Image (cartoon, rainbow, N blue to C red):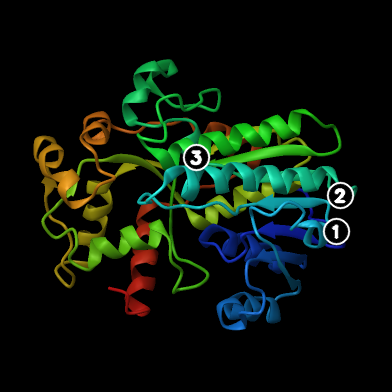
């Protein structure tokens, strides 16, 4: 990666997020001044962990109030920045109103941030955190992928408001980003498409789906067993490195599948059992597909029978070569990611 220009501030939207925390930390380590856009900059307690990182780093942090759905809200935070990291987006599988809670914030938020970039002359590059969910909706979509492998040329065409609405929201948001980017020539858009992000958080008490699911592995919620759900997994620190390369590598362009491992729930459970033994009520069984199809929707409304039919027992396979060759990402072992994350949960007494 080329040396980072530490003389210009960098904007990070959703700076208190799980992935954003590591992006901010790595920028601060490089001596960059980070403009951290957050909803409540007056909540010093919530921001304390970022402030502490800044205090022991050569970089500096400034907080700005910004609401994702308010046009113009990022004007002050973006002023003077050449690079914008847009990471702010809802990540929740269980919502009451998918349009209101997922699609609108993702699409309208992306539009607001990128249109602000159009109005901010200093901006030269925007890095958007999308998702592999914008590439596929169900593992069964591999049937239509070249060689049965997901790649950056593919778009998710199977998700909707009624089926996999989170994946649909990520697809809509990324398409909106390219629409805005293609209509201007001031700045360059580079997109990172992470798979399921795991690994230790900058803030040990961070919330979100990643922390929630890993907690469920250890608190007894999955003691009866896990479904055979295949997924890509990427370490949060590796995903953050991909973002920095996307921002500062002059030749970086387009979309990048950022995924270290073609994995699954049963593999994560196996790693945890091998490392932590019987000290925690870890899942020991892989639940049969018919059983998950039958009872899954009773315990989790997001685990519909269509979701089970199109995902359980179907391996997830993606091509991550572009992220390695063009962004220089080196993916750490899955065992390291899983054990360090679970250890952090133990130390924080969350399991």
Please give the name of the residue rendered at 56% of the width and 49% of the height, measured from the top-left corner.
105
Please give the name of the residue rendered at 39% of the width and 72% of the height, measured from the top-left corner.
344
Q: Residue furthest right?
A: 121
Residue designated by label 3: 169
Secondary structure state at the residue bearing disc 2: loop
Query: Which x, y percent locates residue 32?
Result: 77, 65
Residue designated by label 1: 79
Please give the name of the residue rendered at 75% of the width and 65% of the height, measured from the top-left corner.
35
Q: Tag 3 or tag 1, which sits nearer the N-term? A: 1
| Front one among 123 and 260 | 123
Q: In which quarter of the view is residue 282 placed? A: bottom left
Q: Residue 170 vs residue 346: left or right?
A: right
Measure the alpha-carbon separation of dots 1 and 2: 7 Å
Dot 2 crowding, Cα within 10 Å, few <14, some 14–19, many 20+: some
Q: Residue 48 vs residue 263: left or right?
A: right
Task: For the residues labelled 1 and 2, say whether their Cβ atoms are less than 8 Å apart.
Answer: yes
């Amino acid at each position: 990666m080329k040396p980072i220009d530490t003389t210009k501030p960098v904007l990070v939207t959703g700076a208190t997020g799980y992935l954003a925390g590591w992006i901010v930390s790595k920028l601060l380590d490089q001596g960059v001044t980070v403009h951290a856009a957050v909803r409540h900059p007056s909540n010093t307690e919530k921001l304390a962990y970022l402030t502490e990182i800044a205090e022991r780093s050569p970089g500096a942090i400034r907080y700005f109030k910004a609401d994702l759905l308010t046009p113009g809200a990022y004007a002050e935070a973006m002023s003077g920045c050449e690079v914008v990291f847009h990471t702010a987006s809802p990540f929740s599988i269980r919502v009451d109103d998918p349009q209101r809670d997922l699609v609108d914030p993702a699409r309208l938020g992306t539009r607001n941030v990128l249109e602000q970039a159009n109005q901010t002359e200093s901006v030269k590059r925007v890095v958007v955190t999308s998702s592999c969910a914008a590439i596929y909706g169900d593992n069964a979509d591999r049937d239509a992928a070249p060689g049965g492998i997901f790649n950056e040329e593919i778009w998710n065409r199977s998700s909707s408001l009624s089926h996999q609405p989170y994946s649909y929201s990520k697809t809509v948001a990324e398409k909106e980003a390219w629409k805005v980017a293609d209509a201007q020539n001031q700045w360059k858009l580079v997109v990172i498409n992470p798979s399921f992000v795991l690994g230790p958080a900058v803030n040990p008490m961070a919330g979100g789906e990643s922390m929630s699911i890993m907690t469920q592995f250890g608190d007894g919620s999955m003691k009866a067993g896990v479904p055979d759900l295949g997924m890509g997994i990427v370490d949060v620190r590796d995903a953050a490195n991909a973002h920095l390369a996307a921002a500062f590598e002059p030749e970086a362009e387009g979309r990048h599948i950022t995924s270290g491992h073609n994995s699954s729930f049963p593999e994560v459970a196996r790693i945890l059992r091998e490392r932590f033994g019987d000290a925690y009520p870890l899942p020991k069984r892989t639940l049969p597909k018919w059983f998950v199809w039958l009872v899954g929707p009773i315990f989790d409304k997001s685990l519909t029978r269509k979701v089970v039919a199109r995902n359980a027992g179907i391996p997830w396979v993606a091509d991550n070569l572009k992220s390695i060759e063009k962004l220089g990402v080196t993916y750490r072992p899955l065992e390291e990611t899983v054990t360090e994350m679970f250890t952090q949960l133990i130390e924080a007494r969350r399991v």
